[in-house]
Image: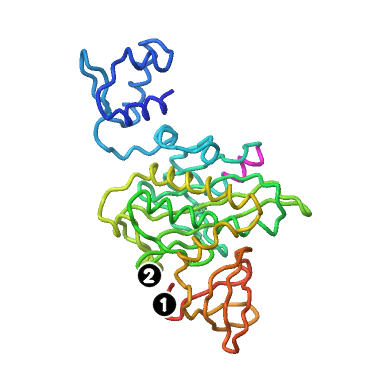
Amino acid sequence: MKSEILSFLRERGDYVSGQELCEHFGVSRTAVWKAIGQLKKEGYEIEAVQNRGYQLKGDGDVFGRHELESRMETRWAGHPVFYYESVDSTNQQAKRSAEAGCGQGTLIVADMQTAGRGRRGKAWSSPPGTNAYFTLILKPEYDPDCVSMVTLVMALAVAEGIRAACGVRAGIKWPNDIVAEGKKLCGMLTEMSMERDYVHHVVVGAGINVRRQEFAPEIARTAVSLEQLCGKKISRAQLIAHVMKAFEEYYGRFEQEHSLAGLLEQYNALLVSRDKEVCVLDPKGEYRGISRGVNAHGELLVELADGSVTEVYAGEVSVRGIYGYV
Ligand code: BTN
């Protein structure tokens, strides 16, 4: 009920009488009073004025389960939410939760990660109070070879969530990064558990740089945060809720055909490398070409010097712009 009281107070933006809360939630005055007391303990500023009721004050940066739940506007993506002050990795926790029976839509969120993981076995620095680290559990009915497309769906959702939360027009560096002004804002990591042709679960995790921060020297030149870009304070819970809303919509479209056909135009419009020269770092040998967008399977189309077009599969290679990180 605490999450519901929070959204009720936030939506009203004015005083709400204890009586109205009791009637709305069908509970006693004591129950309302207790819930308000617990929310205050969690860090919310809720003013209580005699004869007027309760009002939620300020835009404090409370980050936790109730804040996340109270902002979620989805049917299934982001339900339930498990919030951790500290966890090894939200992806690892999501895998454990999925194995323990948590269903599609379960969202794992953490304030900090002690063993955050990036692609290719790299560590993902995850300090507290600074960024948004979250992982969504999916229980798909499609084949394992469709799973790499889920990262592209999440990329679209993160870009849209960022736009909705603060107006920043971020782009996508295929397949795993969200970028703005030529720097990395967010990284994504999709993992799956499968057996023969059957996918047990997929976990798709994202780490979005939110607050201004001093990045580690090895990424200082290529990383940027949302608050650096837009100059205002951003609610991490609101940002994650926006991402979940967009994901739910885009994933619905993806699931209809198990293809990105219905999302291609939107995706390719955000692709930062589109029509630019890229270097494909293929383990079998590097080559250059012009990026021509992705196809309905999420492969990057790269036009070679002889005019032929190759389809680059995300799992095998990475792609770099030839002038720097993007
Ligand atoms: C990359 O760019 O290398 C991918 C980074 C993915 C980081 C996120 S943070 C939330 C989730 N939990 C993890 O351990 N990793 C992902």
Residue 36 position in % (x across, y down) = 34, 21
Residue 316 lies in magenta, yes or no?
no
Q: Residue at x 64, y 50 (%)?
A: 256
| Quarter of the picture holding the N terminus | top left
Question: What separation in Å lies between label 1 and label 2 (alpha carbons)?
Answer: 8 Å
User: In the image, residue 222 lies at what x, y percent?
Assistant: 38, 69
Residue sitting at x 70%, y 56%: 144
Residue density around tag 1, few if under 14, some if 14–19, many if 20 or more, within 10 Å:
few
Write down the quadrant of residue 303 in the picture. Answer: bottom right
Q: Is residue 282 above or below residue 45?
A: below
Q: Amino acid at mark 1?
A: Gly
Q: Quadrant of the C terminus?
A: bottom left
> Position of 272 compared to 96: left or right?
left
The image shows residue 131, relative to residue 17, as above or below, that is: below
Q: Position of residue 203 (x, y in %)?
A: 59, 49
Q: Residue at x 28, y 20 (%)?
A: 16
Q: Return the x and y of residue 64 as percentages of the image width and height.
A: 41, 36
Mark 2 is on which residue type?
Gly
Cβ–Cβ under 8 Å for marks 1 and 2: yes
Image coloring type: rainbow
For label 2, the SS is: loop
Q: Quadrant of residue 313?
A: bottom right
Farthest residue, direction left: 50
Residue 182 is marked as 2
Magenta span of residues: 94-100
What residue is disc 1 on? 324
Q: Earlier in the sequence, mark 1 or mark 2?
A: 2
Please tell me whether mark 1 sits on a helix, a strand or a loop.
Answer: loop
Q: How many marks?
A: 2
